[in-house]
Amino acid sequence: MEGWKKTACVLCGNGCGLEVLVENNRIVKVRGDQDSPLSEGYVCRKGLNVAYHQHNKDRVLFPLKRVGDRFERISWEQAIKEIAEKLKDIVGQYGPKALASLAGGGEFSFLSIPFLIRLVRRLGSRYHYSAANQEFAGRYWAHGLTFGNQNIQMEADFEQSDMLLLIGKNPLMSHHFPQARRKLTQMAKDPNRLLVVVDPRPSETARIADIHLPIRPGTDALLLKAMIAIILDQGLYNQKYLDEHTEGFDQIRSWFSGFDVQGALRVCELEYPVVLKVCRELAGRRSSILDDLGILMNRHSALVSYLIVVLLALCGRIGVPGGNYLLGGGSRPVSKE
Ligand code: SF4
């Protein structure tokens, strides 16, 4: 296997297309794959250094079995046979609920997680654990309440948006979506599009944004509640969308009436006129919102996730072009009971 080969980067969930030059069965050069419909030649520095991971001396290349206080190399056939027998024993003796999978978000696991989840589901278990249990617990709860299923993810159709609001997210460094640097830089340079970043720190993304709200750490829920109150007070909300696509809004409306917006923004250490402008733009434009661990690993992550859904629904921005869209929902496990 020599010469330039097409492959994909597995170092994060974006799956950028790569072309690697292989000599003596080792990667010696890497470049972005222009033919990849996802990444169109884009590659970040992790992807360019994929050879470091591929050929790392500490990488485990074959099954290891614990024998006493050390590990012994065994064949793949033996490993698969022993694991299969053990799984059958557990399910037979205790039922499928005794089984769970655990997977991290580290290098290379993005490729294998779907297979692991499928295996466990086919054995009748619905229990899967990963870093996401910690990272996204608040969001899962909020989406379960608002969309009816905790497994529903909300993403931004921001390529069609003319405004993107980022909260606790720095995609210039952490990506999250394909070609993050390229696409956000294009957006920031486009005079007809608006990039707004809520971040206590002048992050790399905040530095190219049209508006940066340097919020006091941990006050995101207050800001979001203030924004909802402003949009309601100023009549900026989309009543037609609320009537056609939501239910129960009247039950929560009173939470926001009479809210001390100015006082809340003082706590957030933000200027009212700037927040008012952001609210007007959000309600009036083809806008979308993306949040991330900056708020999800912060105080009130469940409340913040909930308020983001309310804010988007008020502006009529869920399930519309250039807005936020819903993904997944997960399939039910195959029951063996
Ligand atoms: S963004 Fe970087 S780490 Fe993620 S898939 Fe693309 S090249 Fe790999």
Image (cartoon, grey):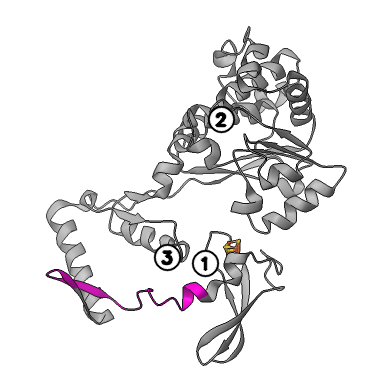
Q: Give the Cα distance between marks 2 and 3.
A: 36 Å
Q: Which residue is mark 2?
A: 217
Q: Residues within 10 Å of mark 3 (few under 14, many from 20)?
A: few
Q: Is mark 1 within 8 Å of ligand 1?
A: yes
Q: Residues within 10 Å of mark 1 (few under 14, many from 20)?
A: many
List x then y, in percent, for residue 262. 68, 13
Kind of residue at disc 2: Pro
Residue at position x 42%, y 65% from top? 112
Q: Which residue is mark 3?
A: 112
The one of 31 and 35 positioned closer to us in this rendering: 31
List x then y, in percent, for residue 190. 85, 47
Callout in the foreground (1, 2): 2
* Left or right of 3 on screen, residue 207: right
Q: Residues within 10 Å of mark 2 (few under 14, many from 20)?
A: some
Which residue, as the protein is rendered here, is positioned at the far top?
258
- As helix, strand or loop, the secondary structure at mark 1 comes to loop
Highlighted range, magenta: 52-70
Is tag 3's residue or tag 1's residue first in the polypeptide sequence? 1
User: Within the magenta stretch, is there residue 60?
Assistant: yes
Image-quadrant location for residue 245: top right
Callout in the foreground (2, 3): 2
Does the residue at mark 2 contact the one at mark 3 (Cβ under 8 Å)? no
Is tag 1's residue or tag 2's residue first in the polypeptide sequence? 1
Q: Is mark 3 within 8 Å of ligand 1?
A: no
Looking at the picture, does residue 212 appear above or below residue 99? above
Q: Which residue is mark 1?
A: 10
Is tag 2's residue or tag 3's residue first in the polypeptide sequence? 3
The one of 336 and 100 positioned closer to us in this rendering: 100
User: Within the magenta stretch, is there residue 125?
Assistant: no
Q: Give the Cα distance between marks 3 and 1.
A: 10 Å
